[in-house]
Amino acid sequence: MRDRLRIALTKGRLQDQSVELFEAMGLDCSPIRKPGRRLIHSIPNYPLDAVLAKAPDVITYVAHGACDLGIVGKDTILEHGHPFYEVLDLGFGACRFALAVKEGFDFYSSYQTRRVASKYPAFTRAFFERKGMDVSIIKIEGSVELAPLLDLADGIVDIVETGATLKANGLVPIETVAPVSARLIVNTASMKLYKSQIIDFIEKCQRELERAR
Ligand code: PRP
């Protein structure tokens, strides 16, 4: 048993909004705002230690119980599955998964096997399986918008926020696949072991989300 909860926060896009939420809840986040070279940040006025990690690592830490809680995008959850509880939709980081193609390309009328590039291959495969479509999935790590431009793929499945990246590259969204936003996740064993502390934290989050609504 530990006397402090551990939370993994997703670095980058969701990091600032996670910290802003915590500060609005009254948590002193100065150690996260000025991390130096330190990797574990102890909140001075609440029994919580925070680590910053890439989105798939947040899932790994929480799934294995290395962290009790995590904040991660629904996009990463949809790709990696649910070996944990998803307890709150935090609302921020809102965007959508979309299927996009080169402007003018008729994706659905081709009889050939379509090639679709994505950073989310499992999610993309499941989407086309539900449609009963034969699609070849190409895993891309970086800017997936490049794949149709280089004729590596006929389309992409990726997150779209403002649509600016698609537009700047002559691509158009043709179907929304799923809505995405940041979620609070909890390790299943931690939920039993640290029930009162975790409920206290979830309720604090909920109160602030309701107040800000
Ligand atoms: C995401 C996504 C798109 C872009 C969409 O990438 O993969 O490229 O944002 O945003 P927009 O609709 O507002 O243009 P991100 O910037 O998170 O970087 P990444 O490629 O490193 O994931």
Image: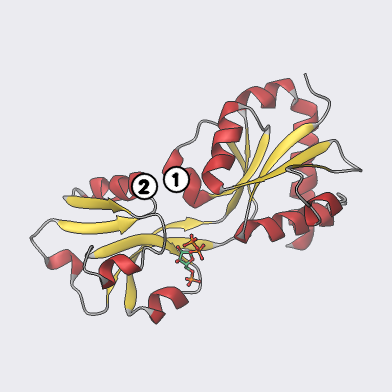
* Residue at disc 2, secondary structure: helix
Callout 1 touching callout 2 (CB < 8 Å):
yes
Pointer 2 local density, CA inside 10 Å: few below 14, some 14–19, many at least 20: many
Q: Which residue is mark 2?
A: 123
Pointer 1 local density, CA inside 10 Å: few below 14, some 14–19, many at least 20: some
Query: From the Cβ of disc 2, is ligand 1 less than 8 Å away?
Result: no
Residue lying farthest to the left in this orientation = 111
Question: What is the x, y in percent for residue 103?
Answer: 26, 79
Answer left or right for 191 relative to 42.
left
Amino acid type at image mark 1:
Leu
User: Which residue is drawn at the image coordinates 72% and 20% (left, top)?
Assistant: 193
Answer left or right for 188 relative to 51.
left
Q: Which mark is residue 78?
A: 1
User: Which residue is drawn at the image coordinates 71% and 39% (left, top)?
Assistant: 7
**In which quadrant of the rendered view does residue 104 lie?**
bottom left
Q: Where does the C terminus fall, quadrant-wise?
A: bottom right
* Residue at disc 1, secondary structure: helix
**In which quadrant of the rendered view does residue 211 lie?**
bottom right
Amino acid type at image mark 2:
Phe
Question: What is the x, y in percent for residue 67?
Answer: 67, 33
Answer left or right for 12 relative to 140.
right
Is 51 or 96 nearer to us in this picture?
51
